[in-house]
Image (cartoon, rainbow, N blue to C red):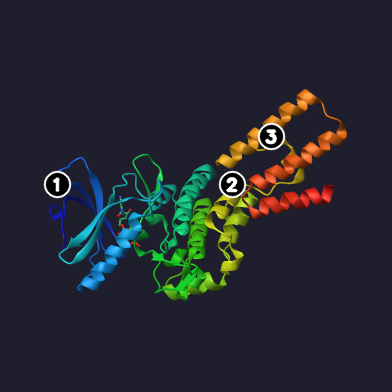
Amino acid sequence: MASIHNTIGNYHLLAELGSGSFGRVYRGAHAILTNRIVAIKLMHGVHLNSQKERDSFIQEALLLERLKHPHILPIVDVGFHEGFPYMVTEYAPNGSLRDRLRRQSGKPLPEQEALSILSQIGEALHHAHEQHIIHRDLKPENILFNAKGEVVLADFGIATVLGTLTIQQATIIGTPPYMAPEQFKGMVGRESDQYALGCIAYELFTGRQPFTAPDFFSMALKHIQETPTPPKQLNANLPIHIEQAVLKAMAKERADRYADVSTFTGALHRPLKTKEQWLDEGRLTPTTSVLGTVKVYFLNTLEGQKKLNKPTKKQSNLATKDKRETICNLHTSHESKSAALAADKKHS
Ligand SMILES: Nc1ncnc2c1ncn2[C@@H]1O[C@H](COP(=O)(O)OP(=O)(O)OP(=O)(O)O)[C@@H](O)[C@H]1O
Ligand SMILES: [Mg+2]
């Protein structure tokens, strides 16, 4: 077993950072490039005896190497130390989301901070899902803050390539408080990651995990059967659209969740608008996305034109309808789009 003052591959071990289900994590420095500080995860629990096992670990590492994204913890190196595989990643010096939650002592995170964290994880997951890679063990311990204070998602190590299937049989791996109902039955897919992100969102917005239970089986039963306490009962200031979005991502049936993770994080940011709100340019708030910027630019342009041309009532009605349809088309969320179209139909 490695200890501090040992060397693994090209790295001197400086300190132990902690341990998890597969092994220990150390802070280390490159033996020659001494400014290169990294995290080294030595997987004690996974002794790879045969060449076949080693090959499959290498295959996995090659796959993870492809996963390059600003919010995914980059892999720097992999290798074997006395038969045990290790993975070297960038060191994230600003702790984990679990550390951040501990500092809150059970209080919800400020809404904007929670939204920003969830969007960043959502982007990382969306990128992985596009490459048919699912995380499978999403939890605050695996969400880290890098040197810039940005969120980076760690431990795609147990991710599975889905191939063309959207769901596949899998051994039960995950962390019970964040596991989707189907994951307890050995099935895992993109939707299970969305469910876990829903549980994390629940915890950030309420300060509490959706379910607590003394053991694995009672936890499984709760995830499979019980409805969580509505988040607004625990945080009265929480906007209703956030509560709705979190509960939808945590739906028991996969088909009842959002189509994908980015639709979920989009819904966290965007309340369903009434017709009046769609038309009230002054109150249309830009979202963080490029689409939001386009939307506001478009509305401003229309507003400018309206002032110049002083349209007749009929022209102005047409422009408004046009504007509404364009906003709908710019929006990616099914819900926002159909709500706006329904409002339009009702009032035309
Ligand atoms: N790249 C990193 N930079 C800084 N700290 C890290 C890094 N990777 C892991 N850690 C820290 O090391 C500790 C152990 O991580 P590890 O991944 O082994 O366990 P875990 O996340 O609790 O569980 P799991 O094995 O299910 O991922 C955690 O506290 C984590 O915050
Ligand atoms: Mg981890």
Q: Is residue 21 above or below residue 291?
A: below
Q: Is residue 80 above or below residue 319?
A: below
User: Does residue 10 appear left or right of residue 347 in this picture?
Assistant: left
Q: Nearer the viewer, mark 2 or mark 1?
A: 1
Mark with earlier residue (3, 1)? 1
Which amino acid, mark 3? Leu
**Residue at 57% in and 70% down:** 226
Q: Which residue, given by chain and number where applicable, does mark 1 sit on?
A: 31
Mark with earlier residue (2, 1)? 1
Pointer 3 with pointer 2, Cβ within 8 A: no
Pointer 3 with pointer 1, Cβ within 8 A: no
**Residue at 78% in and 42% down:** 321
- Coordinates of residue 81 in the picture (x, y in percent): 17, 62
Q: Nearer the viewer, residue 168 or 43?
A: 168
Residue 299, disc: 3
- What is the distance, in whole Å, between disc 3 and disc 1 at their CAs? 57 Å
- What is the distance, in whole Å, between disc 2 and disc 1 at their CAs? 45 Å
Which amino acid, mark 2? His
User: Does residue 305 appear left or right of residue 48 in this picture?
Assistant: right
Mark with earlier residue (3, 2)? 2
Q: Which residue, given by chain and number where applicable, does mark 2 sit on?
A: 269
Residue 326, disc: none
Which amino acid, mark 1? Ala
Q: Is residue 52 above or below residue 333?
A: below
- What is the distance, in whole Å, between disc 3 and disc 2 at their CAs? 19 Å
Residue 211 in view of the camera: no
Q: Is residue 43 above or below residue 71?
A: below
**Placement of the N terminus among the 4 image quadrants:** bottom left
- Coordinates of residue 154 in the picture (x, y in percent): 36, 54
Q: Nearer the viewer, mark 3 or mark 1?
A: 3
